[in-house]
Image (cartoon, grey):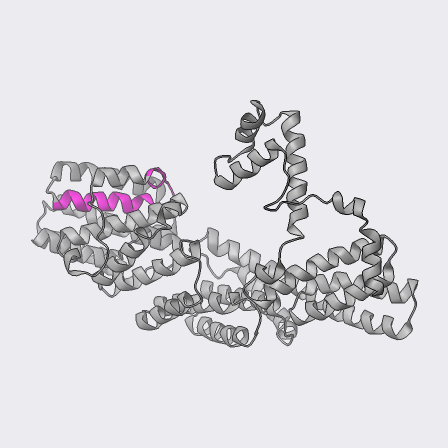
Amino acid sequence: MKDLKAIIGLLTKQKIKQIEILSENSELSEKSRILYEGIQAGTITNDDEAAFCLYGENAKSAKYRVLKNRFKQRLINTLFFIDVQAYGKVAYDRIKSRSYKNWAAAKILYDRGLSTSSISLMKIILQSTLKYDLTELSVLVLRDIKLHYGLYNYDKNKFQKYDALFEELNLIQNYKVESEKYYIILGHIVETNKSATYDSKIIEIEKKLNALSKKAMLIDSYYLRYNLYISHYIIHLIKKDFKNQLSITENAIEYFNNKKGFKQYGVVTFTQISGLIQLSLKNFDKSYEAFQQCLKFKPKEGRLFWQSLHNYIFLIHILKKDYRQAYRILSYVVTHKTFKNIYNDFRQQWLLKEAFIQFLIRIKKIEPENIDAQKLKKFRIKKFLNEIPSLTKDKRGFNIAIHIVQMLFLIIDEQYDDLLDKLSSLKQYSFRYLKSKEYFRSRIFIKMLLTIPESSYNIIKIKSKTKTLHQKLLATPMDFSEQAMSIEIIPYEQLWEEVIGLLER
């Protein structure tokens, strides 16, 4: 009751009236209502639109800035009234939201001189933050509690108890910060350099990471373990050490499966990684099982992770030459109700896949009328190019696939003069933009394509001239990174078989 009295003492009727929040019954001014409904409906998307709609002026308008700031503060106030029970699907989400809100309330009480009530609330918060690995918040809470018992309301035993806990958690927090640093550095390396090598920089990070892991792996901390597992995985990814990659993912999945009440983020992440490893090892069935397992966690339809999983499943069917199933996956994604709302760059990637599927349809490797799936729309190459404007202008390699698919349709339609022009532009594109190591397979495949007109479309000559190039292609396995799969929709060695078959026919 003491705590209730302290809070009620702060919340006089006058102060409650001053708390402005948004709800269905909010009394908003006319302009605030227009702004709220416009943003909600998507008719107002930026400050200039908002200012012009409300005042007929630009975003620098003083009247608009005042309204915007007041409206923003009201939105922030409303955040504190979200029903945390309905906020998250798992206990971790609910506890995290409630703990941060309660901590903010405890700090307000503390600053107003109601330290006893504040510390009482902080002790309750601490019980939850310790259980759910909210180390950062635990450290903040403990700083106030130990200050209270160590100075303002001295209690030797309580101070020593909370001070010892603070030191323990502060050490864990320092481990988290260090492991997160390695994760960021390594993650950036593999994201920006697909042909990253196990050089002196990586070796130095690995030494530090191993030293940290000897101490930190003994600690039962969800996000500390996550940083460590993912960092070790990335190092062995760079080393191309599949055995250790699998060992790390197995240990990670076992650990995160035992963390009940937490987000399934750890399990899903490393299950997806295990699928990628099996894909690289050409264990297609095991890879498929892993990605299907990820889908059982019900990722939000249309979102990036959902797309990524279907992307990998699509590729598995392509690699197995099960083009009927690849057609089903593609049809499911591009005809899904969310497809029109997918971020434009990702939508264009699926349209690019559709173009290659349409190629397989043209050469009779797929018969849509015999497949139980929604039929794809009629394909026209010119319309397709108009639907992917950002990819056609891209200079990071994605343009390769567009050039190739255009070339394939020119061969099908026997437009050999246009084919010569396309191969010439493809040669120039390769020379200008495909110099780095990560594009080795693309360069080889382009050289193979160039032999087609050089050999006057004679199959025997083409096979003879491309024999060495073909062997190089086979000796360099396909990379299964997101970027590589966006370029190499159908593996080049597999696509070459289809091209040869097409020319033979």
The residue at 25%/55% (across/down) is: 492
Q: Seen in the image, is 135 located left or right of residue 37?
A: right
Q: Seen in the image, is 127 located left or right of residue 91?
A: right
Give percent across and percent down for residue 234. 49, 63
Give percent across and percent down for residue 427. 26, 41
Q: Choose top left, top right, bottom left or bottom right for residue 325.
A: bottom left
The residue at 19%/36% (across/down) is: 421
Q: Seen in the image, is 274 located left or right of residue 160?
A: left
In the image, 230 versus 328, the foreground residue is 328
Residue 473 magenta: no
In the image, 4 versus 166, the foreground residue is 4
Which quadrant is the N terminus positioned in? bottom right
Give percent across and percent down for residue 28. 63, 37
Q: Answer whether residue 479 is visible to the viewer in this image.
A: no
Q: Seen in the image, is 437 located left or right of residue 270?
A: left
In the image, 103 versus 480, the foreground residue is 103
- Disc tally is 0
Give percent across and percent down for residue 482. 39, 55
Compared with 334, 325 (above or below) is below
Compared with 294, 63 (above or below) is above
Q: Choose top left, top right, bottom left or bottom right for residue 82.
A: bottom right
The residue at 82%/74% (across/down) is: 161
The residue at 52%/75% (across/down) is: 257
**Prevailing secondary structure class for the magenta stretch in the rendered image:** helix
Compared with 380, 83 (above or below) is below
In the image, 164 versus 302, the foreground residue is 302
Question: For the magenta stretch, what is the residue range?
Answer: 389-412
Q: Answer whether residue 226 is visible to the viewer in this image.
A: yes
